[in-house]
Amino acid sequence: MRIGVNALFLIPGEVGGTETYLRETLRALAQLSEDVEWVLFTNRENDGYLRRIFGPFRHVTFHPLPLSATNRYARILREQIGLPFRVAGSRVDLLWSPGYTAPFFSPIPQAVTIPDMQYRRYPEDLTFLARFATDILVRMAARRCRRVIAISEFSRREILSFTAAREDSVRAILLAADPAFARPIPEDVRRQKLRALLPFEKPYILCIANTYPHKNVHMLIHAFGGIMERIPHQLVLVGKPRLGEPEVQSALRQIAAPERIRRLHRVEQEDLIALYQGADLFVFPSLYEGFGLPVLEAMMSGVPVLTTKCGSIPEVGGEAVCYFDHTNPGDLSGQMLEILSWPEEHRKEWIMKGRDHAGRFSWKQTALKTIACLKEASIAHG
């Protein structure tokens, strides 16, 4: 069987969790399904990146398209018009599009992954034109593809609420985190990495989120500002500025000591693991998630997690994380203070509980369920 993978959406370092999803699911698929030939349709930005990762696999081949995905609308046109012709000439049996959208016309059966319906719940995350185009393309993909993959039960319900996808065509397949997050970095190595990233040697609270409005980073800044005089901690924010950045900047101007907040726009995975493992607390104040991968990464890294009960987060965190009321900034402040004051034994119990829970997720399981779903799509009636 030959399965085509529509990677035209991927711009390395720019598309967030969907990059991790594609990379790790496809890596596990390539390792587990040697009876399948994988044909990757790539763009100018990601062709070299994907070749470095998947080039060693003999059953993975590459079909680069001469397009730059940084031009979103050119990419959409090429996906809708040029990709079907490439697919027709590639002798693949199925086309899987892991990034929300898929061609309207296709000479072969299709499957699509729609990670969430964030643009409907939080339309302010996108410009009007981007939101309008996304809505048309996502609803079209949900209708035209034989199988729709959601990355949580929550996302599955969202897809069924906002699109005309058939209920029996939508499958929820949960994600995982890289086992590397669970491997302790030697303390001297971790200290060296942290010194290169942070201009202080003080304890810190960590948050990882691009500043989209729904990520709610500004609320965390306000909450931290309200308790900073009572704790020695710094706040480390990892993520790129996005459409919620004005609220973040406003929050920074309102706190007494904004210099106690360190911002890092992007870090490599080894440095990210060091940041997780060195934190006293991980806070994830998001109001909407299709999965919530940072929650899982933090649990694996051995850091207590404080988050919301919004979106899919309870599916990921279960009873192994602490939750705060997202409508009450005072509750966030109070729970941060409480967790930071935990006795060492209690802290260790929560860390163990989180690691045990996170160990139930694996990319192998994600891949096995994905390949089963893709094979279903290849033989299912329209």
Image (tube, rainbow, N blue to C red):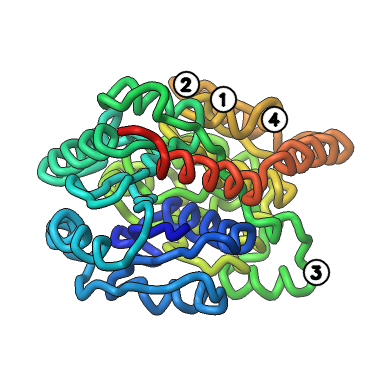
- Mark 4–mark 2 Cα distance, whole angstroms, equals 16 Å
User: Which quadrant is home to the C terminus?
Assistant: top left
**Which residue is depicted at the point 20% across and 42% down?**
137
Q: Is residue 344 left or right of residue 317?
A: right
Q: Is mark 4 on a helix, strand or loop?
A: helix
Residue 369 at x, y = what percent? 57, 41
From the viewer's perspective, is residue 260 above or below residue 57? above
- Mark 4–mark 1 Cα distance, whole angstroms, equals 12 Å
Q: Is mark 2 on a helix, strand or loop?
A: loop
**Which residue is depicted at the point 33% across and 45% down?**
110
- For the residues bearing labels 2 and 1, Cβ distance under 8 angstroms: yes
Q: Name the residue under label 2.
A: 328
Residue 333 at x, y = what percent? 56, 30
Q: Name the residue under label 4.
A: 338
- For the residues bearing labels 1 and 3, Cβ distance under 8 angstroms: no
At label 2, the amino acid type is Asn
Q: Name the residue under label 1.
A: 324
Q: Name the residue under label 3.
A: 186
- For the residues bearing labels 4 and 3, Cβ distance under 8 angstroms: no
Q: Is residue 218 visible?
A: no
From the viewer's perspective, is residue 83 above or below residue 225? below
Q: What element carries label 3?
A: loop
Q: In this view, does 78 lie to the left or right of 329?
A: left
